[in-house]
Image (tube, rainbow, N blue to C red):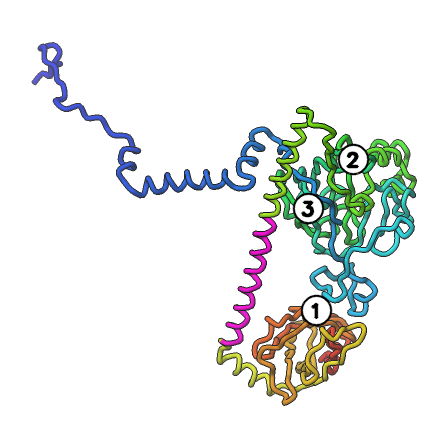
Amino acid sequence: MTIVNRKRHGFSSRKIHASIEPHAVHYLSQRTSFWIAALSVIAYVAGNMMGQYGWHTFWASVLGRTDDSLIVYTGTVTPIAQVPDFERWSRYGGNPKEHTFQQVPRDVLIPLPQYNASTAGEGVYSIGHLGSYATGAENSGSHVGVDIRVPVGTPVRSIASGIVERVQLTDSGGMGIMVVIRHPNVPDPVSPQRTTTLHSVYGHLSSAIASEGMVVSKGELIGYSGKTGFATGPHLHFQIDRDDAPWHPFWPFSYSDQHAAGLSFVAAVDHGLQQSEGRKYTVHPMLYVQANYPPARTTLASADPSHLPSLQSSSAQSRASSRDSAVRTVSRLAERRQSRIASRALRNRVAALAPEHAAASSSASNSVVVSRSTVVTASPEFPSSLSLPEAYTVEITHDGAFTGRTWESVRIRILDAMGEPVRSPDLSSDIYLRTSFGEAEFKPMQLTRFDFDNGTAMVQMLPRGRRTVIIEAKPYGVTSKPMASEDD
């Protein structure tokens, strides 16, 4: 049999019905879920664009720079709100080189002291502006900015409204983890009637929560202090650069300048290398924030139409100020709501105590009670608002010995006059666990009223070394009987 091509015989073929395969969108459009998903995406994008910084952030990503006219100057605040009273904190056994800000008792926190040039290099301000590592005194070196001695984890805030220009998240370089914020339209420290742009720098942080391009308000949290980078101890490096500085953060000398002078970095600072450059391109940071210059005001001398742009600018500032006020109001309402939620949670927790808590309490009663001390009365160091009712006592219970290799259980109880646990102790101050003798680590080190179930809180303690340990509950002055090492 021979196969012959059909074209040789004059035959041809074609389809009666043209079959065109529909596009995938044709099938998707037939389903309701497709349109729901599409509309959800459109609503999400539109909602974000209508937010406070939506369109602004979009155009910033396109144009590459934030519009400075959106930033309204409303005054300045210090970069840190509260610091420990180091003398009083030492009575608790506190040490800024070993303990964090979270371990500082609330009653020893004070507002950041006023900066005084005559005391720079002492107390909180370890190095003054253009100071040296040797003395810390002002104008004794070329260290730009001010070093503020604070424990790790101290909240750091923006000194004024601005735009986060740079965030370094790695522990590299002299400044370590740092944040740089640009502050446009702020009073010029030389002539406060004029406006300028300044850059604030926050160095040696333990962590930064701000991100580049973020618009921050005055006093907004941007990170936590630390000791990253070139730092011999925990502190905040705080400086303010002028806008015309060659770079930010500005430093008055480079490595080549230092090498040419035959000096190490520390020696270069102590010798005041290029101090004049630091004076030219930086501003005394603490004196500037403490001045808290009022916003510049424009006075209209006549009804000249040429003044209309300033009126429009004033109107824009008013609208921006209204937006800031609305944001602050929403924040306050959110804080109040969180407080109410926490209060309800506490009431529910106390009302719904599980039976196993009672069983654990009866089981713990078989252990040896090694201390039952009456809470001390109020004194100038501990105001009456920090003491429990006179009928209450604090009980510290442990088994009297430790191995030094494992965590030991310690029971803290608040008892009434009958020796019964107080179901919901109303603590005016948290309880801070320390050692009055020996060394130990506690988990947790701080007890709030939320930590007490049926008047009992369990704490884990890890002794350091073989020395006998005596536990103390601050600020009530309660101490335990000694806990000795089993190896002795």
Q: Quadrant of residue 336?
A: bottom right
Contact (Cβ within 8 Å) of mark 1 with mark 3: no
Reading the chain from its start, which is encountered first: label 1 or label 3?
3
Q: Nearer the viewer, residue 339 or 461?
A: 339
Q: Which mark is residue 372?
A: none
Q: Is residue 63 positioned above or below 365 on the image?
A: above
- In the orientation shown, which residue stands out farthest toward the left? 1
Q: Nearer the viewer, residue 475 or 262?
A: 475
| Residue ID for mark 2 | 193
User: Callout 1: helix, strand or loop?
Assistant: strand
Label count reads: 3
| Residue ID for mark 1 | 441
- The answer to whether residue 344 is magenta is yes
Q: Nearer the viewer, residue 403 or 348?
A: 348
Closer mark to the observer between disc 1 and disc 3: 3
Q: Which mark is residue 218?
A: 3
What residue type is disc 2 on? Gln
The spot of residue 410 in percent (x, y) is 65, 77
Q: Which region is colored magenta? A: 327-351
Q: Quadrant of the N terminus?
A: top left
Q: Is residue 72 positioned above or below 106 on the image?
A: above
Reading the chain from its start, which is encountered first: label 2 or label 1?
2
